[in-house]
Amino acid sequence: MHIDEWLQTIPPGWLCALVSLVIGLESLGIPLPGEIVLVSAALLSARGVVSPVWVGVCASLGAIVGDSIGYTIGRKGGRPLFERVGRRFPKHFGPRHVARAEHYFERFGVWAVFVGRFVALLRILAGPLAGALRMPYWRFLIANVLGGIVWACGTTAVIFYLGIVAEKWLKGFSWVGLVVAVLFGIGTTWYLKRRAALALDESDLQ
């Protein structure tokens, strides 16, 4: 069963809660497929399964609260926290990943928190790393709130309207429309993430 089919079996209220929970856990530093869940929920909203407004709101809350909890964890644990977690989960928190994320923070400061919402590596590390680097919380919170809202609501809106268009084009083949919309939505999301990552990499070379 694909993730979109599984999500369709969940009542709308619980679906929004699940979106918020998964994104929140991902934001505080647990590697979960938050973006895939958000895209799938947004596509389901285009089919009338759930309200796109509530998907965007719950996703935003999950991102903001999760990042804030991650910030608190990072501030209390400091750098030793990343060393311990890196030994257990080298694929996501290895020295290379942390060093790269830290470099972005040193170069871009608070903007790394905002842009990090659109980049897989920074989306997981932004909150804890900002806390470990002792970034003032009020600056972190502003970037966190803005980044969370723009990412969550923007992604929901884009995927929602793409789903509507795909459904109209392939009205007689709803299942094909859903597959096409899912692939297109994931492809669009990947492209945006890739462009953001390339922009950061190019700035490193300047």
Image: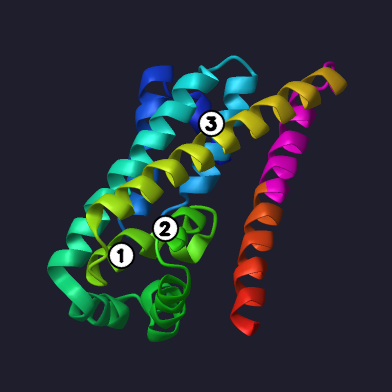
For residue 65, which quarter of the picture?
Answer: top left
From the image, state whether disc 3 or disc 2 is nearer to you.
Answer: 2
Q: Which residues are magenta?
A: 170-188
**Magenta-colored segment: predominant secondary structure:** helix
Residue depicted at 63% across the width and 61% down the height: 196
Residue 205: horizontal and vertical position, in percent? Answer: 64, 84
Pointer 1 or 2: first along the chain: 2
* Circle 1: residue type: Ala
Q: Are marks 1 and 2 in contact (CB under 8 Å)?
A: yes
- Residue 190 covered by magenta stretch: no
Numbered tag placed on residue 113 in the rendering: 2
Residue depicted at 51% across the width and 17% down the height: 51
In the structure shown, which secondary structural element does the residue marked by tag 2 occupy? Answer: helix
Toward the viewer: 56 or 172? 56
- Residue picked out by circle 3: 41
Pointer 3 or 2: first along the chain: 3
Residue depicted at 38% across the width and 81% down the height: 94
In the structure shown, which secondary structural element does the residue marked by tag 1 occupy? Answer: helix
For the C terminus, the quadrant is bottom right
Q: Are marks 3 and 1 in contact (CB under 8 Å)?
A: no
From the image, state whether disc 3 or disc 1 is nearer to you.
Answer: 1
- The residues bearing labels 1 and 2 have C-alpha atoms spaced at a distance of 8 Å
Residue 181 visible in the snapshot: yes
* Circle 3: residue type: Ala
* Circle 2: residue type: Val
For residue 200, which quarter of the picture?
Answer: bottom right
